[in-house]
Amino acid sequence: MRETYTIGTLAQRADVHLETIRYYQRRGLVGEPDRPLGGVRRYTEDHVQRLRFIRHAQELGFSLDEVGELLKLEDGAHCREARTLGERRLADVRRKLADLQRIESALSVLVDRCGAVKGRVRCPMIASLQAAP
Amino acid sequence: MRETYTIGTLAQRADVHLETIRYYQRRGLVGEPDRPLGGVRRYTEDHVQRLRFIRHAQELGFSLDEVGELLKLEDGAHCREARTLGERRLADVRRKLADLQRIESALSVLVDRCGAVKGRVRCPMIASLQAAP
DNA sequence: CTTGACTCCGTAGTCAGCTACGGTCGTAGG
DNA sequence: CCTACGACCGTAGCTGACTACGGAGTCAAG
């Protein structure tokens, strides 16, 4: 028969903070098993899986709301919907990537110029921040 | 003589929300002029400049705490310190960039695979989220 | 001198994703 | 049976950067 865990053990096995599990339950991402007449809930390997699913999705940048959407497609039979979610995420990631790349190049120019400065010249980093709109 | 503005006008000229200015004041990023005996404070072009400085720094990814540090170097005479701040920021930006790039490539592979799927095969996106740790 | 727009000020709410606290109850080991 | 350790539960706090609200005061135009 299947092993079961209390919430603390589940937290350890899935490497997720206990309070985080309770938080996910409140958000409806993780189901709570019935508790036997005022007893203690027992979780199964399915719950471990689900917590891993959530973490994997988060690692790809999905928000918990989006994770909720993905969990509805858990049976793997709605690939088009999953793809749409992935595309949205990808678009967002690419936007952020472009932003960061602009920042990276601006910043590295400034840092380099600060390194090249000799004597009492106005600091290029500060000067750039003071520049017109 | 110099023009002065009330906070609302300052907000318009610097294109910053009025409450944001008050927030910056509380954080000590922007000084408040004395108010003449229970009257209304009057701001100058210097304040507009400072708000722009803050926005520029934020656009390079500096946090408001870091902006505070930068503002201490406003005279442009402490280039080494400014450079150090810039380097820290740059390191952080590059870390985030690397993270996002990993996400981008993982996600684009998955989206592509979802696009290539024919028939009733298990959705690659979902399958990947369900995969082992 | 009144009206109405604006300022001042403190406090509280927003977003996301947790994390913590504290009192009460269940339960496993000795 | 007693004692810990943990589960349960609601609620509150945290981060960062705002944004909103409400009541009192000020100021300029008409």
Image (cartoon, coloured by chain):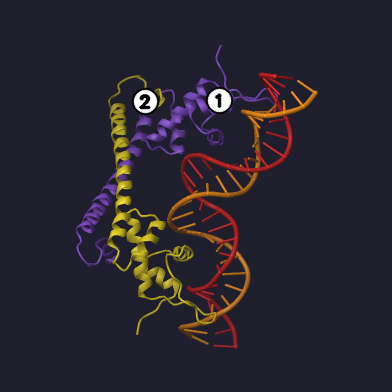
Chain colours: A yellow, B purple, C orange, D red
Q: Nearer the viewer, mark 1 or mark 2?
A: 1
- Front one among B23 and B116: B116
| Image quadrant where residue A72 sits | bottom left
Quarter the C terminus of chain B occupies: bottom left
x, y (%) of residue B47?
A: 51, 24
Q: Is residue A131 shown above or below A96?
A: above
Left or right of A20 in this view: A99: left
Q: Is residue D8 shown above or below A96?
A: below
Query: Residue B9 got which mark?
Result: 1
x, y (%) of residue A97?
A: 30, 43
Q: Label 1: how many residues lie within 10 Å, few (<14), some (14-19) or many (20+)?
A: some
x, y (%) of residue B112?
A: 21, 54
- Front one among A126 and D2: A126
Q: Identify the residue shown where x is 24% and y is 67%.
A: B122
Q: Identify the residue shown where x is 21% and y is 66%.
A: B119
Secondary structure found at label 2: helix
Give, as a three-letter code, the residue at label 2.
Answer: Ser
Query: Residue A128 got which mark?
Result: 2
Left or right of C18 in this view: B119: left
x, y (%) of residue D29?
A: 66, 19
| Image quadrant where residue A111 sits | top left
Secondary structure found at label 1: helix
- Front one among C16 and A89: A89
Left or right of B75 in this view: A55: left
Residue ranking furthest to the top = B1
